[in-house]
Image (cartoon, helix red, strand yellow):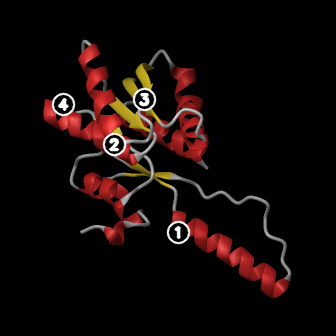
C-alpha cells in the first residue's frame, strides 16, 4: 500500500524530528499512481502539523536518479538554509539527492522508498537514513499461496490483501527482504 508507505516516511520524520522539521519532497512521475499515493501518505500525516513540519519545496524528479540529483541541486541553491529532511518517492531519487548533499558536504536526512539493494547498502553505510520496505517477495508468496489454495481447495482468495510497508533504518536493516543481495 503506497499510501501507508508514504505515511511510514512521514512517521519516521516525526520520530527523528519531534520538534519539527523543514522538508523537501521529491515526487515521482506526475499522474503515476505510486507517485500520487506515496505523496498522499506523506501529506496525510504531516499536513495536520504544518506549523511544525514545513515543506520548503515539493517537485517532481520523475522517479529518476539524475533528476533527483538535478532537482535537489536546484532546490538547495534556492534555499537560504538546507532542509532537515529530503523525502523521496523512490530510492533512485533519494540516491540522486544523496549524491548532491555529499558533494556539498551537507548532512541532511534522506528517506527513500522501495528498499532496493543499493539503497539498503547506503543505509548500512550511513548514506541514506532510511528506505521504505514493501516486501515484494512477501506479496508474491501470498499471491501464489492464494492461487494454490484456490486450485487445491476451491478457496476464494481475498479480494485485496495489503502488506504493511515499514521504514528500514540501520537499526532494523536485518528486516529488509533483499538484504541478502548486498555485497
Mark 3 or mark 1, which is nearer the start of the sequence? 3
Give the Cα separation between the discs numbered 4 and 2: 18 Å
What residue is shown at x 43% (from left), y 45% (from top)? 90
Q: Which mark is drawn over residue 65?
A: 2
> How far across and how far down the image is residue 110, in percent?
32, 38
Quarter of the picture holding the C terminus? bottom left
Give whichever of discs 3 and 2 has the lower sequence position.
Answer: 3
| Left or right: 38 as drawn, with respect to 100 | right
Q: Around disc 3, counting alpha carbons within 10 Å, would you say few (fewer than 14), some (14 to 19), or many (20 or more)?
A: many
Q: CA distance from mark 1 to mark 3?
A: 28 Å
Q: Is residue 40 visible?
A: yes
Quadrant in the rendering for residue 176 = bottom left
Name the spot of residue 65 as percent of width and height, x first. 33, 42
Circles 1 and 3: CB distance less than 8 Å? no
In the picture of the structure, the residue carrying the numbered disc 1 is 137
- Quadrant of res 121: bottom left
Reply above or below: 73 against 160.
above
Left or right: residue 4 compared with residue 26? right
> CA separation, marks 1 and 4?
35 Å
Of helix, strand and loop, which one carries label 4?
A: loop
Residue 162's x, y, as percent? 66, 57
Tag 3 and tag 4, C-beta contact below 8 Å: no
Q: Residue under circle 3?
A: 25
- CA separation in Å, label 1 and label 2: 24 Å
User: Which residue is identified by label 4?
Assistant: 106
Report crowding for label 2: few under 14, some 14 to 19, many 20 or more residues within 10 A (C-alpha): many
Amino acid at each position: 500500500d503506497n499510501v501507508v508507505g508514504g505515511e511510514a516516511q512521514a512517521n519516521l520524520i516525526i520520530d527523528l524530528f519531534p520538534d519539527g522539521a523543514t522538508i523537501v519532497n521529491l515526487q515521482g512521475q506526475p499522474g503515476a499512481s505510486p507517485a500520487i499515493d506515496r505523496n498522499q501518505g506523506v501529506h496525510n500525516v504531516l499536513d495536520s502539523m504544518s506549523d511544525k513540519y514545513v515543506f520548503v519545496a515539493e517537485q517532481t524528479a520523475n522517479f529518476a536518479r539524475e533528476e533527483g540529483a538535478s532537482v535537489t541541486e536546484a532546490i538547495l541553491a534556492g534555499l537560504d538554509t538546507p532542509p532537515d529532511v529530503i523525502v523521496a518517492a523512490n530510492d533512485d531519487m533519494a540516491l540522486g539527492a544523496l549524491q548532491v548533499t555529499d558533494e556539498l558536504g551537507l548532512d541532511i536526512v534522506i528517506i527513500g522508498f522501495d528498499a532496493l539493494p543499493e539503497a539498503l547498502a547506503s543505509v548500512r553505510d550511513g548514506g541514506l537514513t532510511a528506505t521504505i520496505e514493501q516486501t515484494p517477495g512477501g506479496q508474491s508468496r501470498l499471491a501464489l499461496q492464494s492461487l494454490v489454495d484456490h486450485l487445491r481447495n476451491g478457496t476464494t482468495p481475498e479480494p485485496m490483501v495489503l502488506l504493511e510497508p515499514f521504514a528500514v533504518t540501520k537499526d532494523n536493516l536485518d528486516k529488509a527482504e533483499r538484504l541478502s543481495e548486498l555485497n
